[in-house]
Image (spheres, helix red, strand yellow):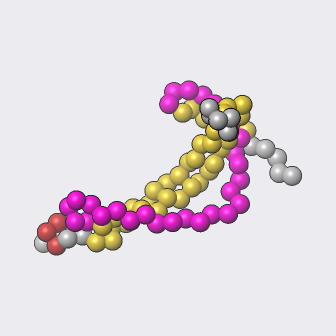
Amino acid sequence: MAQKHVTKLTIHGQQYEVEEVPILKMDEKISTYELADGTTLTVRTVVTNIYRAIGQHNEQGEPIYVVRSNSIPSLAGVPDSLREE
């Protein structure tokens, strides 16, 4: 069994002791947004780390997780009226 990686994270000014939970499988989806200005934007969220707060649970008794991620935006369509000539 792998050794546990315990660390502390500060979230909204409060410090929590957390344990990193290894990711075994990923299925990253791309979200598409049609904006009011006619632009179509796609965003892919890439999760880099997942942590479980030690000794912390929500109102239903479930463990609390912290997800660290990066968002990768891409323009899928831009109206000609917004393009610079």
Outermost residue toward the top?
14
Q: Residue at x 67, y 63 (%)?
A: 25
Q: Quadrant of the C terminus?
A: bottom left
Against 19, residue 17 (above or below) is above
Report whether residue 8 is seen. no
Against 55, residue 48 (above or below) is below
- 6, 26: nearer the viewer: 26
Q: Position of residue 29 (x, y in %)?
A: 51, 66
The picture quadrant where one finds residue 28 is bottom right
Is 13 included in the stretch rendered in magenta? yes
All told, the count of numbered labels is 0
- In the image: residue 75, left or right of residue 28: left
Q: Residue at x 25, y 65 (%)?
A: 39
- In the image: residue 36, left or right of residue 18: left
Q: Which residues are magenta?
A: 12-39
Is 53 included in the stretch rendered in magenta? no
Q: Residue at x 59, y 54 (%)?
A: 48
Q: Position of residue 40 (x, y in %)?
A: 30, 67
The picture quadrant where one finds residue 11 is top right
Q: Position of residue 26 (x, y in %)?
A: 63, 63
Q: Position of residue 58 (x, y in %)?
A: 62, 34
Q: Residue at x 71, y 53 (%)?
A: 22
Outermost residue toward the front?
60
- In the image: residue 35, left or right of residue 59: left
Report whether residue 46 is seen. yes
